[in-house]
Amino acid sequence: MQKYIEFSKEVAQGKAEDKPIVALESTIISHGMPYPQNVEMAQNVEQIIRNHGAIPATIAIIDGKIKIGLEANELDLLATSDDVAKVSRRDLAEIIATKRIGATTVASTMICAELADIKFFVTGGIGGVHRGVAQTMDISADLEELSQTNVTVICAGAKSILDLPKTLEYLETNGVPVIGYQTDELPAFFTPESGIKLNSSADTPEAIARICKTKNELALNGGIVVANPVPQADALSKAYIDQIIEDAVKEADDKGISGKDATPFLLGKIVDKSDGKSLKTNIKLVENNAVLGAKIAVAFTQL
Ligand code: PSU
Ligand code: MN
């Protein structure tokens, strides 16, 4: 299995020195944001993680290898190439075997992080149960992965392109803790509030790191979701973004967009319809998550 894994110089050195490492996904780069904001976001987020004492490891599939940490030219490739596969658990073996370029989702980034013994992973939002699930059965593989793979995912909740109450129910059924960071509400990505109460909240990175450690020691398999609200100053108004999301979901329905294309289609439409306002918020919240993720990873090494 290790023959498929290739560490960047920075990550290899970080591992050798037992530094805290934070994984990052690449679908957000290739399918979640337009160029050039995607590559700028990826570089900034890596630097934020370094500035807070951890090593960033952006994960992608290139040339038959799982890359743990990308060199600058590889990051550019992911950001600019229009032939990047969106790789979830289902696609991982195929994209590696056929040596295509693949961007990893939350699900496959968790798989690769666990293979590389990385415990923390920062992203924007997780996938979930889609609205209209009763007709489509569209439930992100991210949720199944969270039920079995031992990685803590720091995110800003999930976009309300999803059915948030059903997403939480699914996580509860699968025994996945969802911890609000300094909040007792599930953040809804573009907005800090959703009106949906969480069962757990924590006020410090140390408190979260202790929960992660205890879960490991109990050998309770599965991930943890840390839900970090977007800062109020960067948030969009709920009424504004809800209308845009409503329109985007309707357009996807009308066009019959389904399967792995649904989420990227909706993300692109939201950026267009908001004249880029949603993109600004999206970038800010990933940066905010990077700060928290690095702090949790550092706190974990000090327990
Ligand atoms: N949500 C976002 N931005 C993203 C994604 C989700 O706000 O970029 C990406 C993540 O990679 C996530 C994936 O894992 O979409 C989920 O896709 P699907 O719904 O097809 O499982
Ligand atoms: Mn789906």
Image: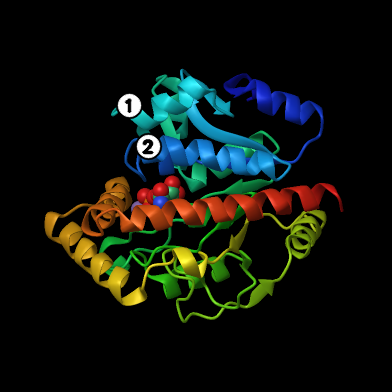
Direction left: furthest residue: 254
Q: In this view, does 37 lie above or below 190?
A: above
Residue at point 68%, 28% (across, down): 11
Find the distance from the CA under tag 1 to the CA under tag 2. Answer: 8 Å
Residue that protrudes farthest toward the front in the picture:
233
Instruction: State whether label 2 is within 8 Å of ligand 1.
Output: no
On screen, 73 above or below 191? above
| Position of residue 262 in the picture relative to residue 28 (left or right) | left
Q: How is the image coloured?
A: rainbow
- Label 2: state its secondary structure: helix
The reply to whether discs 1 and 2 touch (Cβ–Cβ < 8 Å) is: yes
Q: In this view, does 179 lie above or below 36?
A: below
Residue 251 showing in the rendered view: yes
Task: Name which residue type carries label 2.
Answer: Ser
User: Which residue occupies 42% across, 26% down?
Assistant: 76
Residue 81 occupies which quadrant of the picture?
top left
The residue singled out by tag 1 in the image is: 81
Q: Which residue is drawn at 81% across and 34% down?
A: 18
Viewer can see residue 222: no
Q: Which of marks 1 and 2 is nearer the N terminus?
A: 2
Query: In this image, 104 relative to 175: left or right?
Result: left
Percent coordinates x, y for residue 214 in the rendering: 81, 60
User: For the residue labelled by badge 1, is the local secondary structure a helix, a strand or a loop?
Assistant: loop
The image position of residue 282, as x and y in percent, is 42, 54
Residue at x 42%, y 71% (from the top left corner): 164
| Identity, as a three-letter code, of the amino acid under mark 1 | Ser
Give the residue number, with chain letter if any, for mark 2.
30
Task: From the viewer's side, name the closer residue of 66 and 204.
Answer: 204
Q: How crowded is mark 1: few (under 14 residues within 10 Å), some or many (20 or more)?
A: few
Residue 245 position within the rendered picture, expressed as x and y whole percent measured from the top left: 27, 65
Q: Is residue 247 above or below residue 184?
A: above
Quadrant assignment, res 132: bottom left
